[in-house]
Image (spheres, grey):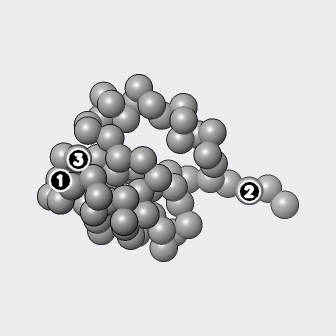
Amino acid sequence: MNRTHAAVVGDSVWGMLAARRARALGIGLLSGDGGESERACAGALRVSRGSADMLKRIDGVAARA
């Protein structure tokens, strides 16, 4: 059986909850409402301060898949 992995990038708690429901990795961005702890509690694997920060550390997310 092949296994496919997906990541959801979102800037809200709702995006992280949607990732969890879809059984995808959640990557939170701090460009929306709320803070790092809210996204982490909602299931974010990692929370980045913006898209440039996320891209610098994207390899670490792939290792978790």
Q: Position of residue 22 (x, y in %)?
A: 51, 69
Q: Name the residue: 37% across, 59% down.
A: 40
Q: Secondary structure at mark 1?
A: loop
Q: Name the residue: 19% across, 46% down.
A: 31
Report how far apart the C-alphas of labels 2 and 1 lie in the structure: 31 Å
Mark 2 or mark 1, which is nearer to you? 1
Residue placed under numbered mark 1 in the picture: 32
Report how far apart the C-alphas of labels 3 and 1 lie in the structure: 6 Å
| Residue 49 placement: quadrant | top left
Q: Is residue 59 visible?
A: yes
Which amino acid, by three-letter code, is at mark 3? Leu
Q: Residue 37 or 64: which is nearer the viewer?
A: 37
Q: Which residue is the extreme one toward the front?
A: 37
Residue placed under numbered mark 2 in the picture: 3
Is 50 placed above or below 21 here? above
Q: Name the residue: 55% across, 53% down.
A: 6
> Is 65 displayed left or right of 31 in the figure?
right
| Residue 18 placement: quadrant | bottom left
Q: Are marks 3 and 1 in contact (CB under 8 Å)?
A: yes
Residue placed under numbered mark 3 in the picture: 30
Q: Secondary structure at mark 3?
A: loop
Q: Residue 6 or 35: which is nearer the viewer?
A: 35
Q: Position of residue 28 (x, y in %)?
A: 34, 51
**Which numbered disc, 2 or 3, marks the residue that appears first in the sequence?**
2
Which amino acid, by three-letter code, is at mark 2? Arg
**Which numbered disc, 2 or 1, marks the residue that appears first in the sequence?**
2
> Is 31 displayed left or right of 58 in the figure?
left
Q: Residues within 10 Å of mark 3 (few under 14, many from 20)?
A: some
Report how far apart the C-alphas of labels 2 and 3 lie in the structure: 30 Å
| Residue 15 placement: quadrant | bottom left
Q: Name the residue: 37% across, 67% down.
A: 42
